[in-house]
Image (cartoon, rainbow, N blue to C red):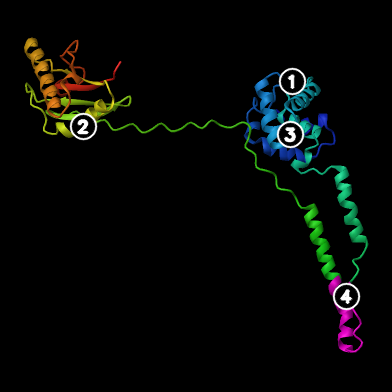
Amino acid sequence: MAEDWSIDVKKYAPDADDNVIAAIVRHCGIALRNRDSSLVSFTDTAETDLVRESYCKKKLGITDPDSVIDAAIAKVGERMKADHTKNRVTVYYLLAEAFGKLGIFGAVAAPVAAAVAAPVAAAVAEPVAAPRVAPLAAVPEVAEAGGSMRWLWWLLGLLALAGLLWWLLRPKPEPVVVAEVTEAVVPAAPAAAPVEAVPDGAGITAQEVEGKPEVSVYFDTAKTDIYPNFDARTEAVRKYAADHAGSKLQVSGYNDPRGDAAMNAELSKNRAFAVRDALVKLGVPADAIVLVKPVDTTDDTDSLARARRVDITVVDAQ
């Protein structure tokens, strides 16, 4: 990929304007940093559609039907078919030239330049006539001052002419256009909600999983006593079930692996009953609570403290 883009452009347009080439390079921006995006694939309809919509319509301001624009793009591609590296800068220059839009990048077409230069040259060659001043013979001092006033009119005329020249020849600001090849913006992942620590003994943790609240009620060793803060910590899960018709609260009890297995299973069931009764006491209908015995009530996957618990989860209506 050539660093001097004008070399490639001038293979097709020997009289190409270097200032226009530089302006097109600035327009392409980051697209020229990568070899693939610095080239135009005329066999890729997505690419040619992008050239039509983003460059021809938005940048060049072409309002012709799509068929006309597509034909012009295809003609440039045919013109460059022998060149395996169809540089984007060259393609854009030839399209701007084909549609007579080089002026957008700062070039002035020859007929326009002549039309502007003719009146300007005439204005410079022909002095601005000073306005006629009525004679003031009766006041000699004022009459004499009239001669110096002519110089003032000359000066004002020259200043007006200079202003006209500046306005006609001033550089036109280049419209700001979003680069065609943009870097994808990846939104930042939302911050994860803090996970509550498992209490060492009786306690309650509440969390949200996939948009639904869940509660875990923990117990002291060999105990079924409900933690005093049960009302406040289960408010979210109770409210969710009440607001979603047909939803039920599933209650499952666990125990740590120590001791007799049969006694532990009974302990898990009694803990689940204690949680169910506490929910009913807080106004949850008994038929909205489902007691589900886990396949294995003995849970030692994490810690003994975590194993001594009852989980309350929401089951949506089917």
Q: Which residues are magenta?
A: 131-153
Percent position of residue 209, x then y = 30, 25
Q: Is residue 305 above or below residue 61?
A: above
Which image quadrant: the C terminus?
Answer: top left
Which residue type carries mark 2?
Glu
Q: What residue is shown with label 4?
A: 150
Give residue 235's mark. Answer: 2
Q: Earlier in the sequence, mark 4 or mark 1?
A: 1
Which image quadrant: the N terminus?
Answer: top right
Give residue 84's mark. Answer: 1
Of badges 4 and 3, the one in the foreground is 3
Give residue 63's mark. Answer: 3
Which residue type carries mark 3?
Thr
User: Is residue 294 visible in the rendered structure shown here?
Assistant: yes
Badge 1: residue crowd in 10 Å (few <14, some 14–19, many ≥20)? few
Of badges 4 and 1, the one in the foreground is 4
User: Is residue 303 visible in the rendered structure shown here?
Assistant: no
